[in-house]
Image: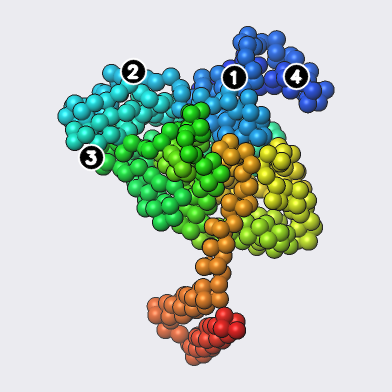
Amino acid sequence: MASLGAYLRLFGAGGTLVRNDALLPRELDAFYSPVVRVAANTLRIFATRRSGRPGERLARSLEGLGPVAIKLGQLLSTRGDIFGRQFAEDMGHLKDRLPPFPMAEARALIAQELGRPVDEVFASLSDPVAAASLAQAHDATLQDGRRVAVKVLRPGIDRRVAADSAVLALAARLIERLAPPLRRLEPLKFAETVIRATELELDLRLEAAGADELAEVMARDGYMSAPKVLWEGVGKRVLTMEWAEGLPLSDEAALVQPDLDRKALADNLTRAFLAQALDHGVFHADLHEGNLFAAAPAKLTAVDFGIVGRLGPVERRYLAEILWGFLQRDYPRVAQVHFDAGYVPRHHSVAAFAQALRAVGEPVFGQKANAVAMSRVLTQLFEITALYDMHLRPELVLLQKTMMTVEGVARRIDPRHDIWAASEPVVRRWIARELSPVSRVKQFAADAETALRNIARLAEPKPVTVVEAERGARLLWFALGAAVAGAAFLAGMWLS
């Protein structure tokens, strides 16, 4: 049960949005129903800070509401194609240009975490060069002359995140109770996923481990890289890494660097994310402009590994097959995969769902980004998911959120970015490797081995009757025969 404090903070958050005319902004009056318009006009009586554009007013509100709200603003700021370029720019400072905390506090935290005076570890330590919702970054030099970035958590941020999390969980419960049509979006499970991801960001030792793991993954493909972790400069609230090459994409100068290939840079971003998710099942789940550095001609370096997403083999397979189906414009196959994965309830028609997917896919397939109205596409997708009773999948929340962010950033890098063309090489590689006849033979053999182990395990702990022994023998021969027959069939297909 939510505490009184959570109710008061939720009420206060609503009040902040109302005061800034950011809850039902006046600029959108034409889109409101008569009932909503009356409510908006009533709330506007209490709007005492009406100055600025809608994006500026919303950014101002979210900045005062805490780290979880700021992360929502960071996501919105990447989608100028949906919410408008001016809106996205007005929200942009939430990525890495928030007010920093005092330098004296930062130095004290670093010394406490590393167990040594700051001057013993660093030859120099600058004032904050970037400040986000949970931490700020400093430019520093080690005693051996190497340039590094030092990330320091904000003092007391754990208490603020705990308070924000309670409010988010309360809001999710109220939505489930008061808005039945939105229950399919699983607001409570969504909130739990966001809260858990944010809690993990509060231990920079975990972020260092994530950065180290993803650096190894990224090095295998070369689409993106990660700075090296300096483990001697890592503590629960402090993280030290090599300095990232290039300029942050949140800096307008980043995209006008000499010899920068914007098309290749956007392609590398899309392919880096897909390669991480599909090939390795682990991906950087916070790829907004403030966390990406660009250098000519098309080098991308990621920082801030506080949120790491993971996909199991089954989810990776479904994702790859859905993407491949869209690339091949094979809508019946895409529809069938949705049913196989349990994303669409079985009582619906696969053929009818394929028809709905075709209505979404055909108008945008092969189109350049600047020719596609993403707001209309997303509206249509939302309508289709409602029509087919599709629920939000908590295990895919970080994946979907990151896909949305990556597409938005890629579109900003290259307004003509074709996400399908960029995705094709990575998806084709996965399909060729994982769904080839040889891979199927290996999977079939592995399944047979698992079956045999299960049969053996059942036989070990207790004596069996003659009937049970005969049944086990039949199962054993069936598994062996099926494995041999399946391997022979698939090998024959491969050789032919």
Residue at the spot x=61%, y=48% of the render?
419
Looking at the image, do the residues carrying marks 2 and 1 touch, with CB atoms under 8 Å apart?
no
Relative to 56, say whether 431 is above or below.
below
Q: Closest to the observer: 196 or 223?
A: 223
Residue at the spot x=52%, y=51% of the render?
271
Amino acid type, residue under disc 1 in the picture: Glu
**How busy is the neighbourhood of tag 2: few (under 14 within 10 Å), some, or many (20 plus)?**
few
Q: In the picture, residue 262 is in which quadrant?
A: top right
Q: Residue tagged by mark 3? A: 232
Of circles 4 and 2, the one toward us is 2
Mark closer to the chain start, 2 or 1: 1
Residue at the spot x=50%, y=54% of the render?
275
**How busy is the neighbourhood of tag 1: few (under 14 within 10 Å), some, or many (20 plus)?**
many
Residue 2 appears in view: no
Q: Residue tagged by mark 1? A: 56
For marks 3 and 2, give the CA distance: 24 Å
